[in-house]
Image (cartoon, rainbow, N blue to C red):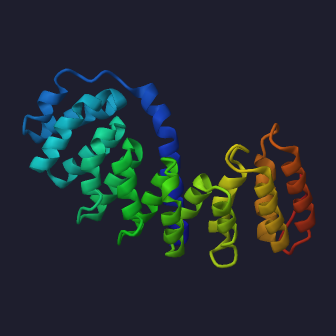
Amino acid sequence: MRASLLAAALGAALALQSHGARAESAAVPLPPSAIKRLKSGDGAQIKAALDDVRMSAKAGAPAVPAIVEILKRGLSLPLTQTALETLGDTESAGASEALAWYARHRNAELRRAAVQALAKTRGPAATKALRTDLSDPDPGVRGLSAIGLGSMKAKEAVADLFVALEHKVEEAAASIGQLCMGNECERLAGKLGSVPFDIVTGGLDEVMLRPATEVSDDLKIKIVGRMREVGTSESNRFLKNVQAKWPPRSSPRVKQAIDQAVLATSGSPGSSGVPQ
């Protein structure tokens, strides 16, 4: 179960990261007839118009009020889901209030669609809704909410993400790693031993590769030291992974600490290979 949830989380995170670039390259002008077709009341025309808005991406933002209006009037379940996804593709904060309502819908599938869209439309309403949905009954909604808060850089949600992590929302760890500052990052490292190792290190990997303007070299060296103390094959693999991804022009002091820690843990049971 955990592996499948993590796979889904990774897929959603990668989709959020690459969405903007794809939308920019694929966007086409919004057809002049799209808004009229959205208001037609005909399901086929509405679906075609929603497809046009999605293709227009950010350029489809003028259609947001019409989409919100037809959602208020009521649509079939498939069209409702398509409409929610389309609002996300516009990346318009003006859609966030309507999406936040659907993030509380009784249908879990619609809640998931709304949460994913909120991560793209952003704004205060989106952040508030995702923080609330960290405690949703559906694990998919909880995980997607955690991922969305990380992608939105919602630093104010770190405390909520820690609560979610303690309640087994495993996707919260990576988002904490993207957002934490100072003591918060140390608190994440302190979860080693009480939270599965691969979950915690999914967050610590994010911490280690953030710029020094966000996470100090001293803190990164402290995390490396904690991993060295753990001294297991798992910690060795984590350190080697960070070592392999360490940017060439980043802190040589941290790089030295990583290299030394890799050597120190290389004899741990189950570890293999030598540092590069």
Place of residue 261 in the rendered image (x, y in percent of width and height, measured from the top left): 88, 61
Image point (51%, 74%), residue name:
168
Image point (33%, 28%), residue name:
56
Place of residue 205 in the rendered image (x, y in percent of width and height, measured from the top left): 69, 56
Image point (34%, 42%), residue name:
88
Place of residue 140 in the rendered image (x, y in percent of width and height, measured from the top left): 41, 64
> Which of 205/178 is in front?
178
Does 7 appear above or below 26? below
> Which of 191/232 is in front?
191
> Which of 194/156 is in front?
156
Does 242 appear above or below 70? below
**Residue 121 falls left or right of residue 237:** left
Does 151 appear above or below 203? above
Image point (31%, 34%), residue name:
54
Place of residue 67 in the rendered image (x, y in percent of width and height, measured from the top left): 19, 39
Q: Residue furthest bottom?
A: 194
**Residue 183 falls left or right of residue 257:** left
